[in-house]
Amino acid sequence: MLRPTRRIASKAPRAAIATTLTFLALVSGVHAGMAETFAYVGNADSNDISVFKMTESGEMISVQTAAFKGVDKPGSSTPLAITPDHRVLIAGIRSQPFQAVSFAIDPKTGQLSPIGNGPLADSMANIAVDRSGKFLFSASYGGNKVALNPLAANGVAGEPKQVIPTGLNAHAFLPSPDNRFAFATNLGSDQVLGFAFDATAGTLTPNDPPAHKVPEKSGPRHFVFHPNGRFVYLIHELNGDVAAFTYETRSGAWDEIQRTTALPEGFSGKPWAADIHITPDGRFLYASERTTNTLTAYKVDAASGKLTTIGNVPTEKQPRGFHIDPSSRYLAAVGELSDSMTVYAIDQGSGALARLKSYPTGKKPNWVEFLTLP
């Protein structure tokens, strides 16, 4: 009678141990393969990129400062873009010689390794990669032009394929969500240019109509599409307006449905609005304003696309750039005059911002990109 008892007793610990080991292996496997989120900050005066790893709680850990090779002089800003396959980060250099600097993104550590530099047509205030990852859009504020460069398989820009004159002060140049159109803001001419984009041939042709006019002296600057592709939101630098448009995917037409402001209540002075971003889940929109050093939050109505102002919070000094992480839980804003970045938690119910912590960056930070790997 004792032997069966011994056998049962001896099997039980082995089974328990096996179960525990299997559980631990699964848990460790989950953690080992968990996605990691990184933030990349373009620093104009130090000619480098600050790389941070973000924890689940929104804490930022500095992991690298990636310097630009072959760049000696600082430019006025450092726009960044990441390819759709998350393999390459590209920085626009706004000092001569004007060039796009490409870095390989390590899929495990998020760190950057130089690949090579390619030519840009001018000093470009904004760069963006098309949805196929084969072309680089860029807009020149001082040169009054936009350009299209092919990207090689390794992510390095080739000679410009098209350089197109625009109205005054081209500021942003981005593809539509379906990659069939591209749009360029002309801050000094108060218009948004529309182009039909052939991603196979890599060609741009003026859309019909070729431009959408906005109010005089409003200064259209940056814009963002709603994740559902049905709405566009445009911030105006010179009057602080934020405008909402319906977007017609077939024709690429914009139709304004609302106009509100990024200026705090009781504002007096000269507006100097800068950046605009929407949460990846499409529920909240944010805008930055440099005269008041504030971020304004809006709730987005999913059906109509219209905005309801939530409120504003103080942020970094001269907040030219900010971005929202892919989980829609955190916002990071940088200050050109503070050389630092502040991270905010986004309240998932109200969209209100709660300041978490500030971190030093390079000199004159102006651009933030988030990326979750793998």
Image (cartoon, rainbow, N blue to C red):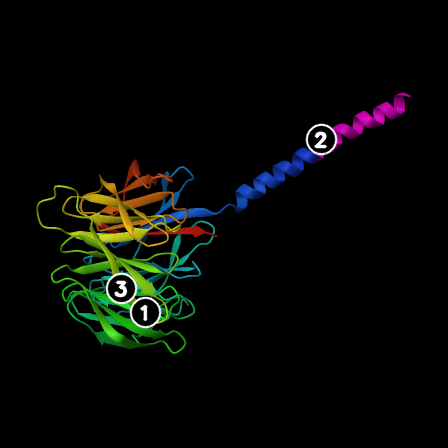
Numbered badge on residue 16: 2
Q: Nearer the viewer, residue 257 or 170?
A: 257
| Residue 15 drawn at (x, y percent) | 74, 33
Q: Left or right? Give the position of 309 relative to 86.
A: left
Numbered badge on residue 315: none
Q: Is residue 6 rendered magenta in the image?
A: yes
Q: Is residue 359 rendered magenta in the image?
A: no
Instruction: Name the residue beneath numbered marker 3.
Output: 255
Q: Given the image, on which type of amino acid does mark 3 rest?
A: Asp
Could you say whether the residue bearing mark 2 is in a helix, strand or loop? helix
Q: Given the image, on which type of amino acid does mark 2 rest?
A: Ala
| Residue 12 drawn at (x, y percent) | 76, 28
Few, some or many residues within 10 Å of mark 3 (<14, 14–19, 20+): few
Residue drawn at x 13%, y 56% is: 238
* Nearest to N terminus: mark 1 or mark 2: 2
Magenta residue span? 1-18
* Nearest to N terminus: mark 3 or mark 2: 2
Q: Left or right? Give the position of 361 relative to 302.
A: left
Label 1 and label 2: CA atoms lie apart by 62 Å
Numbered badge on residue 252: 1
| Residue 59 drawn at (x, y percent) | 37, 38
Residue drawn at x 22%, y 71% is: 211
Query: The N terminus is located in which quarter?
Result: top right
